[in-house]
Image (tube, grey):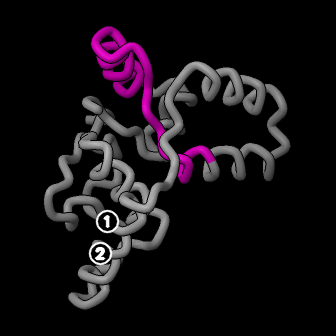
Amino acid sequence: MTGALLDTDILSEYFRGNRKVVANAEKYLDKAGKFNISIITYYEILNGLLYKDAKKQLMRFAEFSEINNILLLTIESVGISAEIQAKLRKTGNEIGHTDTLIAGIALSNSLELVTNNVRHFKRIEGLKVLNWTK
């Protein structure tokens, strides 16, 4: 698979209408046709919207999810994530389990990660990171 995986913070900015993010997203869609998000991002967005009881946003997110790719955890992605977490933990540079799971999904699918949390994800060897907010 080629393309990019959108992190939760970028997807949130996209839904909020952040002009830079939307402009970059439109350019990406012209080439790729669909967005890729991880099941972790799906969970985080869904959880936030349910917590806020944001019915209109929940409907919009459901429609978005139906037409885009939601990448699941696999044995390969979890293995990569566990290696990342162990390495970062040994060096005292942990970034959290959800972020390492997202990175593992990106790496196992040969995708760049689009995030505004570059500081965390730059710690992961071999992960190409883009920031659509800049």
* Kind of residue sitting beneath label 1: Ile
Left or right: residue 123 compared with residue 53: left
- Quarter of the figure with the C terminus: top left
Q: Main secondary structure of the magenta part?
A: helix
Element type at mark 1: helix
Left or right: residue 37 compared with residue 59: left
- The percent coordinates of residue 100 (x first, y second) are 38, 65
Q: Residues within 10 Å of mark 1 (few under 14, many from 20)?
A: many
Is the residue 3 above or below the residue 26 in the image?
A: below
User: Would you name the residue on which mark 2 appears?
Assistant: 83
Q: Is residue 34 magenta?
A: yes
Is the residue 44 above or below the residue 29 in the image?
A: below
| C-alpha separation, residue under disc 2 versus residue under disc 1 | 5 Å
Q: Residue at x 53, y 37 (%)?
A: 70
* Kind of residue sitting beneath label 2: Glu
Element type at mark 2: helix
Q: Residue at x 42, y 45 (%)?
A: 7
Q: Residues within 10 Å of mark 2 (few under 14, many from 20)?
A: some
Residue 42 position by quadrant = top right
- Quarter of the figure with the N terminus: top left
Extreme top residue here?
A: 30
Label 2 close to label 1 by CB (< 8 Å): yes
Left or right: residue 108 compared with residue 48: left
The stretch of residues the image draws in magenta is 19-42
- The percent coordinates of residue 119 (x first, y second) are 25, 61
User: Would you name the residue on which mark 1 appears?
Assistant: 80
Camera-nearest residue between 13 and 40: 40
Left or right: residue 37 compared with residue 90: right
Is the residue 41 above or below the residue 37 in the image?
A: below
